[in-house]
Image (cartoon, helix red, strand yellow):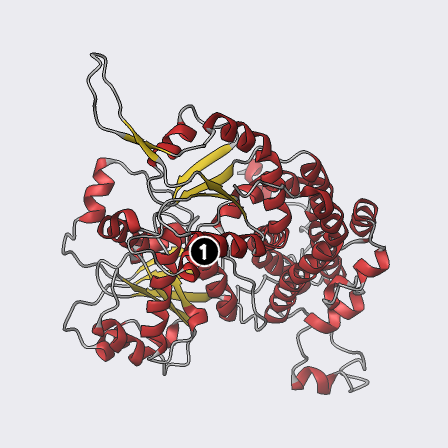
Amino acid sequence: MADAEDVTSGPPAPETSPPPALETSPPPPESLQFTIAIIGPRGSGKTTLIRSLCNHTERFGPGFLDSYFRDEGGEHGVERDSYPPLPNVTLLDCPGYKPGDSAMVYVDSIKPDTVHCLVVTLGETITDADLQLLGAIKHLGKPICMVQTHIDLTLHTEKRQQGKGYWRGQTLMGMRATAQEQLGGHGMPGSGIFLVSGLEPQNYDFQGMVDYIEKEVLQWKRPVPFTTEPHCQELVSVFEVQCDQEGLSEFCSLLSIFLDNPPPVSAVVGVTGSDKEATVSALCEPQLSGLIVKPLPGPGTPPMAVEQYLQNLQSEACDVYLILGSGMDNSSRAILVEALVAAGKHCMLIGGEGDRRPKHDANGQEGASKKCHAGTDLPGLRVALEKGAPQLVRERLLHAIPIIIVQLVRRERRRLMMGIYDICLDVCAKSSEGHLQDALSTLSSKLSSFRSRFGLDEDSLTLISQVTGCSPEDLRAEIQCPLAQDPSEDQLLQLTSQPLSLTELVWSYVPRWGGGEEASSKLSADRTYRLLVEAVWGMAEDAERVLLHGCTNQKVAKERTAFCHWPCV
């Protein structure tokens, strides 16, 4: 007991005050959470589209293909998926509707008041039920995106049905016009209609659809450039690695290198006309170095109008066209060649009507005749094409500069947008914990890094000026976004601070009890997020203008010497 008394005896311990309660960071505001509902008929590819939007790559094994083409008839509830490019956006995979379902009942079941954007998937054909659904949702006041899926399967069906007369580019244009006519007649603007394949997100209108959806969710009012030029993607890819590592200011330097030494990209040779099989076979065996031979349909029988034939050829986006002489009269051929040359295309007329030469087998027996074009020097043609391939790639590069810039800027914009939600939460948390100056410094630092990535800071402008010969003043004049002008921390505070409540404002003017001092400012999450969105999208627009302006001198200088001069015959 004595030992126990010794333990409990002694001077009382000093009273310790509990540690001050730390101010917890506010939860993410609901106003920064956005929801996109994917709706449409059953089997229209909603889940496949969402997987592509979430960057899931499909593995085309037997099991996947079986499930893809088999309608198992099952139903599922609403499934939620995070959208990686914008972490504060959720995709809702809604159940599909069946023929005979009421459009109004279906719309009510998805609770449209809780979503910010509606994406409607349509199958291979647009049905009356699809149009009824459009009529039911267009009055909700929500952004709407109409997406016709399975476009790859539709094109495959068209190719099988049209046979040798199949023009892919023209068929795709016709499908797009049909969809816009059907949906436009029910009040849907053409800018919100897209043809996609969930299995081929790199093709068709997929990128344009993504930009449209993100633009509507983020309430970006200015138009976003949209290009459907898949033949330029190979050129874009040769710039991506360096621009990803160093920023967009490296584009002009790389362009100068590639204009002097064209990148290892294949030029496309379109072979058109009647009886072209022999010429195509001779150009493909053995394979041409640096060239892809693309057989194209002829003018048909009877020959189509020259204007239509020209439009079909240009929709195939070849670098040079070999036009076999048979199947068109001399006047039509002359008109076609003149129109292609006037449009900046290369073309060569090959041979005349041709002759039939009997083919003999190993026993000397005469077999099926093979048509050869009189006067055609196929070995010489192969040499000419291979020699001109780098020049053709250089020309395509010059013509594609605006498209390449748009694609590279878009890539950088989307990469930066992936992080702005976390930046917003971090900055606002520092502000809520009383570290306002630290929050403003972080915000200012992030904006500076955006300027550098887009090639809008002084070092980048100096580099672009040295490479292109444009003055820094002219480049700087293309910058219009106020947040690209290095705003001060006081200006950032004014743009992002949370307005004082009426109580805080009154007490700040009471000298004794309120202290007569202005209450400490906190940053508004909504205003901070909006500022970051304005910064990224606004600087992206500036980057396009700066790079286009800088490349003008490079383009003009090279155009004087870059173009091939092919013989027309």
Circle 1: is it few (<14), some (14-19), or many (20+) Cα within 10 Å? Answer: few
**Residue 129 rendering spot, x and y as whole percentages:** 21, 73
In front of the other: 21 or 429: 429
In the picture, residue 65 is in which quadrant? top left
Above or below, 112 against 387 in this view is below
Write the residue at 30% across / 51% down. Answer: 165
**Residue 185 rendering spot, x and y as whole percentages:** 34, 79
Write the residue at 37% across / 41% down. Answer: 353
Write the residue at 74% across / 69% down. Answer: 493
In front of the other: 218 or 295: 295
Question: Which residue is label 1 attached to?
Answer: 331
Residue 51 visible (yes or no): yes
In front of the other: 201 or 344: 344
In front of the other: 505 or 151: 151
**Residue 286 rendering spot, x and y as whole percentages:** 42, 23
In the picture, residue 439 is in which quadrant? bottom right
At label 1, which amino acid type do we have?
Ser
* Position of residue 334 in the picture relative to residue 222 (left or right): left
**Residue 189 rendering spot, x and y as whole percentages:** 42, 75
Secondary structure found at label 1: helix
